Image (tube, rainbow, N blue to C red):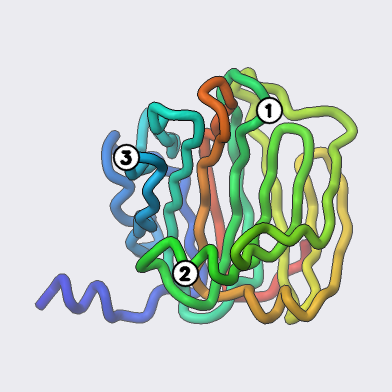
Amino acid sequence: MVGTFLQLRVSPSAVEDDFRRANGAIGYAPTRQQWIQVPTSIGPQVVLATISDNTLVAPSSGIATTAAYSGVTLPSPVRVFQTTAAWSDGDNTGALGMITNPHGLTKITDITSGSLHVVITPTKMDIGIYAGGLGVLRSVTFASPMLKDGTQYTNRYTVDEDTFSYRMWDGTVGSISDPLIGTYNGQFATIEHFRTTLTGTLPIFTDMRASTIAENV
């Protein structure tokens, strides 16, 4: 009965997590939302992100591509999304994802069949819609790349119906409007660890926040 209650109760309007807890499974955020691992198979393995030394990390898949999706459910579409992350050493084929979708967190197609998909590498950000593939609406290249030495970088965006506004770690700000943004933004917020080569860098999340309440970027 208790487990059923935890699954059915309405989540708070914002999730905040600094991952400062015991090593192991992600479990619950301090704001009480349960983290869900969205199952995706990369070759023979499903990669699960875990807490390690007060950060959220993902192990290598053992093959070229590594992808781990960790999500939470909010009661209405996300209006604010922010992450703070550092980078492991490696080439720039790694990326972090800040993803929302209106479908769910049960299977990877909830994300890949239609989501607002923000992909950030050490050198740039792509704002796009993932629907069978990533359709980039805008690409922003940073004036200088993020360092891979443990430095923490915060990136933040807001969504107001069809308008996406952003403030990046280097002070870059901007906005873009497209009807697809409102269509594919949703209440299911996911952060992603991703890389496409064995030598690629991986993000190390130290903080994330997502809210259903409008704020300035």
**Disc 3: which residue:** 44
Indicate the quadrant where residue 62 lies: top left
* x and y, in percent, of residue 73 in the image: 43, 70
Instruction: Tell which circle, 2 or 3, labels the residue nearer the N-terminal end.
Output: 3
Tell me the kind of residue under disc 1: Asn
- In the image, what residue occupies the spot 75% across and 57% down? 127
Quarter of the N terminus within the rendering: bottom left
Q: CA distance from mark 2 to mark 3?
A: 21 Å
Q: Is residue 115 left or right of residue 6?
A: right
Write the residue at 59% across / 18% down. Answer: 89
What amino acid is labelled 2 in the image? Answer: Asp
Dot 1 alpha-carbon crowd within 10 angstroms: few under 14, some 14 to 19, many 20 or more: some
Vertical placement of 143 versus 97: above or below? above
**Between residues 11 and 72, which one lies in front from this camera angle?**
72
Circle 2: element type: helix
Q: Position of residue 192 (x, y in %)?
A: 52, 48
Residue 71, given in percent of the width and then of the height, sits at 44, 59
In the picture, the quarter occupied by the C terminus is bottom right
Q: Position of residue 65 (x, y in %)?
A: 50, 35
The residue lying at 85 percent from left, 47 percent from top is 140
Disc marking residue 110 = 2
Mark 2 or mark 1: name the one nearer the start of the chain.
1
Kindly identify which numbered label has been placed on residue 92.
1
> Where is residue 38, by image quadrant?
bottom left
Between marks 3 and 1 in the image, the one whose residue lies nearer the viewer: 3
